[in-house]
Image (cartoon, grey):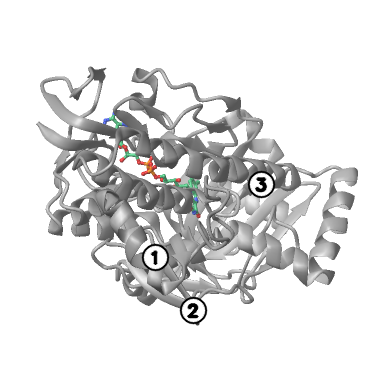
Amino acid sequence: MTEVVVVGAGPVGLFLACELRLAGVDVTVLEQRAERGDITKGVAMHARTLELLAMRGLAETFLDNGVRLPGWHFGFLEQRVDFTGLDSPYPFVLSFPQDRTEAILEDRALALGARIVRGVQAVGLRQDHDSVRVQSADAEYRAAYVIGADGAASTVRKLSGIDFPGTDATFYSYLGDVVADSPPAPGFNVVNENGAMMVAPMPGGFHRVAGYDPLRQHAGRGALSLDELRETASRISGADFGLHSPKWMTQFDSATRVASSYRAGRVLLAGDAAHMHFPAGGVGLNLGLQDAMNLGWKLAAVVRGRAPATFLDTYETERKPWAEDVARHTMAQTALITATTAEGLALRQLLSDLMGSLPEMSQKIARRLSAIDVHYPPADPDAHPLTGTRVPVAAMPDGRPTTLEISPGTTAIVRPDGYVWWAGKPEDAAAFVNSTGEYR
Ligand SMILES: Cc1cc2nc3c(=O)[nH]c(=O)nc-3n(C[C@H](O)[C@H](O)[C@H](O)COP(=O)(O)OP(=O)(O)OC[C@H]3O[C@@H](n4cnc5c(N)ncnc54)[C@H](O)[C@@H]3O)c2cc1C
């Protein structure tokens, strides 16, 4: 029996495996794909994710190989969101392709001792009061806990009977990660009566070209050809930007859902298995990595018998509201991206003007997209006001909590996922550590 089986070696499953291994938990990751993925899918890495990676000593690998973008779009508004004022060591969006993120995380998970079994598709799940069994076509894996990190169509979620309420697709979006011989100026995005388009630089000389084309709605989800992308670009933007050499081309939809529960007994969900939404703002992968960081240390404490199983319920309490927030602001953005009527364009102009003239609006949206705003209100009303707030970066390479002097006379104990666990007078810290030692 393994202590934890993670179903899905996407970025979230792999990062969770790393976090569990840091705490010494025995982890097996089951992945249906025989080979590593080569899809560039999630490219935007936001400030809070970079802070969390920095806590584990991983940020440099990403920073050295990504493209730093000072601004990013909100609903393709002409005036961009300015990230340069974020109170973070990483006041930008880092463009970094998902296949490389997965490769980095897989190498790390293996180096930390995780077992990754490829070519195994989970098709069955059965749990009793002391274990869960995951079945594939020809084997069974027994574990104390199972994590469904198997993406938006999660088999684990369905087999656990967890609902996935939300809205169905209302439109389809095109996307090509391609080379552009004549790219537009950085920060290009446009919405007009013909549709919507954004172009964002990626590492390796690629650009992401994506948006909404009213004339491509019949095509639904799936394949897109280079000729079709060039025709769409010309019609919406007046130029095809010399697009060629596609790395990834697709059509995807705007369905938005959040799991009704993140836990069913010994089964938990993380990443896209728990939430899906239109990728406006480039936040989905970030949200999932933050789930993994929140869940990892808690699950390790429970598996090792240092915390009661009910401790796992704080994972949903803390993380689900942020997934719901992302669902709301990505839906708001889809309304703006598809606002191609005269009235819609007028609304866009008004909001864009506000974004340009009210720095506070841009800053608030930057904080929201970057997840700098994420905090976890304490259950105890008498807790110190700093409890549950974000610590920008604290060196925790081994995933152990750390103690920081945050102001003269105030000490904070920082959780392994970078939020204040306790704050107060330095002389009281030892008592808190003793009281919670069982969780660590
Ligand atoms: C077009 C597009 C653009 C995006 N852009 C961004 C962006 O810029 N920034 C951002 O943050 N996010 C972005 N996202 C979202 C991001 O790609 C996802 O949030 C991310 O992939 C979620 O990771 P995950 O590990 O939860 O799931 P996935 O990446 O879906 O991984 C799930 C894994 O589970 C495996 N699996 C599935 N079922 C089984 C099974 N039954 N048994 C075994 N294995 C199984 C799959 O093969 C897969 O490897 C984008 C998404 C799309 C579609």
Q: Earlier in the sequence, mark 1 or mark 3?
A: 3
**Residue under numbered circle 3:** 329
Q: CA distance from mark 1 to mark 3?
A: 32 Å
Locate residue 84, reporting x and y percent. Answer: 62, 76
State the residue lying farthest toward the bottom. Answer: 408
Q: Is mark 3 within 8 Å of ligand 1?
A: no
Q: What residue do we see at 55% from left, 72% from top?
A: 92
Q: Between residues 406 and 425, which one lies in front from this camera angle?
A: 425
Q: Residues within 10 Å of mark 1 (few under 14, many from 20)?
A: many
**Residue under numbered circle 2:** 409
Residue 141 placement, left or right of 392? left
Q: CA distance from mark 3 to mark 2?
A: 39 Å
Q: Is residue 293 above or below residue 26?
A: below
User: Which quadrant of the picture is home to ligand 1?
Assistant: top left
Q: What residue type is disc 2 on?
A: Gly
Q: What residue do we see at 67% from left, 41% from top?
A: 331
Q: Residues within 10 Å of mark 2 (few under 14, many from 20)?
A: few
Locate residue 316, reporting x and y percent. Answer: 46, 38
Locate residue 47, reporting x and y percent. Answer: 50, 66
- Comparing labels 2 and 1, the label whose residue is closer to the camera: 2
